[in-house]
Amino acid sequence: MEEFNDLFNLEEINEVLDNKNRDPYVKDVGDRVSIIDFSSTTHMNGLELDPEMDEEMSFNSMTYFIVIQTRQNYKHDAYFKTYRQDLVVVNPITNKQYRINSGHVQLK
């Protein structure tokens, strides 16, 4: 286990996890948002994103989502941190829905 821990810089990981660049604004149903941090994003069934299967979830300034549910209370264990997923967003083109932490989306 010690060898595994040596692969990562825990200070760097903690800095990313404590990132103060999260969007503090309240999101409401109907808001257009863009995702600024994918670490708390999952499919509706709780499965993590797959970069090959979920191409729409790449950083793309043209992609946006619409908030369709707020005040949710799902937990997502992302290995180094457990996130509270309090929003459900939908891609208006594909109609795919995702759960995410509200601090990880930004009003568009």
Image (spheres, helix red, strand yellow):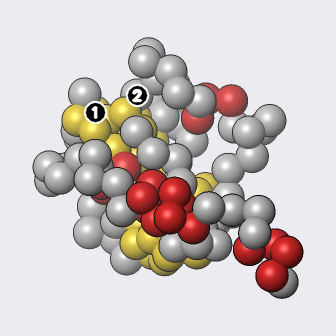
Residue beneath disc 2: 64
Q: Of the residues shown, which amino acid type is indicated by label 2?
A: Tyr
Question: Contact (CB < 8 A) between labels 2 and 1?
Answer: yes
List the residue tagged with mark 1: 32
Q: Position of residue 39 (x, y in %)?
A: 53, 54
Q: Position of residue 89 (x, y in %)?
A: 41, 47
For label 2, the SS is loop
Q: CA distance from mark 2 to mark 1?
A: 7 Å
> Is 48 situated above or below 65?
below
Q: Residue at x 28, y 39 (%)?
A: 106
Q: Secondary structure at mark 1?
A: strand
Along the horizontal axis of the image, is 27 left or right of 2?
left
Do we see residue 33 in this rendering?
yes
Q: Residue at the location (23% across, 35% down)?
A: 107
Quadrant of the rendered structure where residue 5 is?
Answer: bottom right
Q: Depth check: 71 or 100 in front?
A: 100
Q: Quadrant of residue 10?
A: bottom right
